[in-house]
Image (cartoon, rainbow, N blue to C red):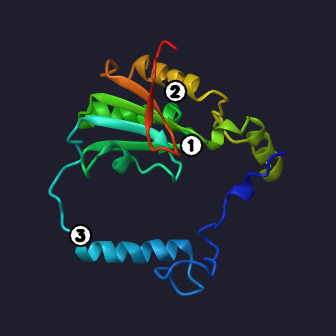
Amino acid sequence: MNDYREAMPIPASQPLPSSADSTSPAPDGTVTDRLVEANERYADAFTDPGMDARPVLQVAVVACMDARLDLHAALGLELGDCHTIRNAGGVVTDDIIRSLTISQRALGTRSVVLIHHTGCGLLSLTEDFRHELAAEVGQRPTWAVEAFKDLDEDVRQSMQRVRTSPFLLHTDDVRGFVFDVTTGLLREIDPQG
């Protein structure tokens, strides 16, 4: 049995460890307190960029939520360039299709970039994760884990899900990549394998 809780180092409701950097809040503060304080500093210097919600580059990027992926830096993007849609694994689920549909139909995006990455946590999970949760909390999750064993094949599956969705207007420019977390490089995945 995998104990997925060990992977979570500091829940937002627990105090920060004493080794936190000098920007951390008082010892009894939480991670969320630290984020709110950072936002106050950000807002002090913030000026309205005067843009609307339509991405300048008309692109939506779907990627994993992994903290090692700084998508804007890795792709040379600026504020306002793209829609960034993230979930565990960067897997194209119904909710991703929902977001892409709104992105395209209401906000003008035309291209989709899909990014998985090396060392992804979904490579080591299985649907047993759902069964373990059900046993622990007494209720089975309504969602699938969407774990995978082959990064390239899952990128291909995600590309196919986008290309075949009846809700999306623009499915010609859909490309998939694997981001290497040790080199920072993208490797493009051939949709045909």
Q: How far apart are marks 2 and 1 (CA)?
A: 13 Å
Q: Which amino acid does label 1 sit on?
A: Ala
> Percent position (x, y) of residue 129?
75, 42
* Count of numbered badges drawn on the protein: 3
Disc assigned to residue 88 = 1
Mark linked to residue 165: none
Q: Quadrant of residue 37?
A: bottom left
Would you say residue 168 is visible in this rendering?
Answer: no
Q: Quadrant location of residue 176?
A: top left
Distance, label 2 to label 3, CA atoms, is: 37 Å
Q: Earlier in the sequence, mark 3 or mark 1?
A: 3
| Disc number lying in front (2 or 3) | 2
Question: How many neighbours does mark 2 have within 10 angstroms: few (below 14), some (14-19), or many (20 or more)?
Answer: many
Look at 24% across and 35% down and name the residue there. 58
Determine whether 60 is above or below 181 in the image: above
Q: Is residue 43 above or below residue 85?
A: below
**Dot 2 corresponds to which residue?**
155
Give the mark, 2 or 3, whose residue is nearer the N terminus.
3
Q: Is mark 3 on a helix, strand or loop?
A: loop
Instruction: State the SS at label 1.
Output: helix
Please tell me in which quadrant of the rendered image residue 36 appears: bottom left
